[in-house]
Image (cartoon, helix red, strand yellow):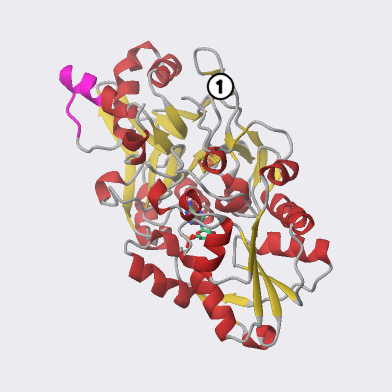
Amino acid sequence: MSYGELAALKEECGVVAAYGTGADLPGLLYVGLFALQHRGEESAGIAVSNGQQIALDKGLGLVSEVFSMRSLEELSSIRPTLGIGHVRYSTCDGDDLAHAQPFIVRYLRGNMALAHNGNLANTDELRREMEQNGQIFQTNSDTEIILNLIARYRREGIVPAVQKALGRVRGAYSLVLQSDNTLIAVRDAHGFRPLALGRLGDGYVVASESCAFDAMGAELIRDLEPGEIVVIDENGLRSERLLGELPPRHSCIFEYIYFARVDSVIDGLNVHEIRRDLGRILAQEHPAEADIVIGVPDSAIPAAVGYALESGLPYEEGLVKNRYVGRTFISPGQSLRNLKVRLKLNPNRHVLAGKRVVVVEDSIVRGTTSRNLIRLLKEAGATEVHMRISSPPYISPCYYGIDTPYEEELVAARHSTESIRQMIGADSLAYLSIEGLLRAVPGGGNCLACLTGNYPVL
Ligand code: AMP
Ligand code: SF4
């Protein structure tokens, strides 16, 4: 498989689903998507079904921009009993409405809708084969391919159809599917992307992260196992498996480092606690002569707190975030990205002036954020800036559902720690070791490919 080909397909997202949760099911999905907004700011969508009819609303933008009171009422008007929702991250090759999910397909016997988070490896091959058999596609989206593949086998029953279709798909995905009266959730055989199951009253909910359940007022039951298919219908909930032998588990370790929200529990581990431990171990591995510790909001704050606790240095709020600016990483051009860093973070000079500062960040990707940040901290009066990174160097692109730049743009792929230190203008720079990372994330079975360059074979 060509990694270049895969990189062009990168996509990362958040999914949510609900079954039998009562009257305001669209409103519930909306709240769940709101809590998952950090997983995708580009588009949002909700599809609901009452068993006979399906209703869909999706659009470009934030959850708060896509849906209105009126559009949610319209979705509610069919009196839905189940539904799915999706938020999508910006990618370089497809941020138009055609790529917004969920996708729906209407066929002879009914309707289906599907939304997924992940990155599929062999969709070109599948598309060619299906086109040769007369299938016409509306978009070049992976989601449409999976959905049509499932529809093709649908006569055999929905679970065998999902098993058969996904048996042909290689890749990293967590997906939710609604078919007439049945809700289905699937986590790929490696378990790359997270997917959790929760309960709400007499109904069930599914989401990429458990923080969505907190917002929905639901209770986390458990994470889906790699290769698990959860089926929810009028007979209740049952668990099935993808066909074939299960490969070793490879749950994404970067969800803990950066991507997931700190109040989520993924595969039994709370993200905040893991990040705090990353900071503690970082302080053991790389102490610094300094006066205060600060963190880069939001994702690196728990690691900075951990670093401060372990080192005995005081933790201060040296950087104040403007909460109304989206993630800088998603801006299209480099110059706009630079501007956004300044817009987004304001150094608090009352805390920084005359101080030797340890600044804890969760990762360096291109190096732009760190370089701007250190300049800002020095302009605000910091006498020394010691940068500490709560993950090992990010040296390889992700092909399993996290949107990362090509290898040429990953600064640690090409430069030593000392040369990165010079480039970003830090007085010292140190990264957490792989061993330190594995101490903080107990249990094993994680993907570390972007940090080691060793890719699990799909
Ligand atoms: P950079 O400026 O390219 O070095 O990006 C580093 C910043 O991006 C850090 O603040 C990270 O928290 C954040 N980051 C790391 N990985 C990702 C990712 N996959 N998507 C978006 N932001 C990221
Ligand atoms: Fe996560 Fe990195 Fe593996 Fe991608 S390569 S799934 S970001 S650990």
In screen coordinates, is 279 left or right of 197? right
Q: For the N terminus, give its image quadrant.
A: top left
The relative height of residue 345 versus residue 194 in the rendered view (above or below) is below
Query: At x 53% / y 73%, what residue is drawn?
Result: 373
Disc 1 is placed on an element classified as: loop
Q: How many marks?
A: 1
Foreground pick, 195 / 257: 257
Q: Position of residue 321 (x, y in %)?
A: 55, 74
What percent of the width, then of the height, locates residue 440? 73, 45
Quadrant of res 70: bottom left
Question: Residue 115 location, x and y as percent?
Answer: 40, 38
What is the span of residues highlighted in magenta in the rendered image?
127-137
Instruction: Judge left or right: residue 172 versus residue 111.
Output: right
Depicted 456 relative to depicted 43: above or below: above
**What is the x, y in percent for residue 257?**
61, 50
| Residue kind at label 1, given as amino acid type | Asn
Q: Is residue 191 above or below residue 16?
A: above
Q: Residues within 10 Å of mark 1 (few under 14, many from 20)?
A: few
Query: Residue at the spot x=44%, y=65% of the render?
Result: 328
Q: Is residue 357 visible in the rendered structure shown here?
A: yes
Q: Is residue 10 above or below residue 365?
A: above
Which one is in front, 81 or 257?
257
- In this figure, which residue is indicated by the disc labeled 1? 235
Residue at 35% from the left image edge and 55% from the top image edge:
71
Please name the residue shown 68% across and 76% down the image: 317
Name the foreground residue: 415 vs 147: 415
- The residue furthest right is 312
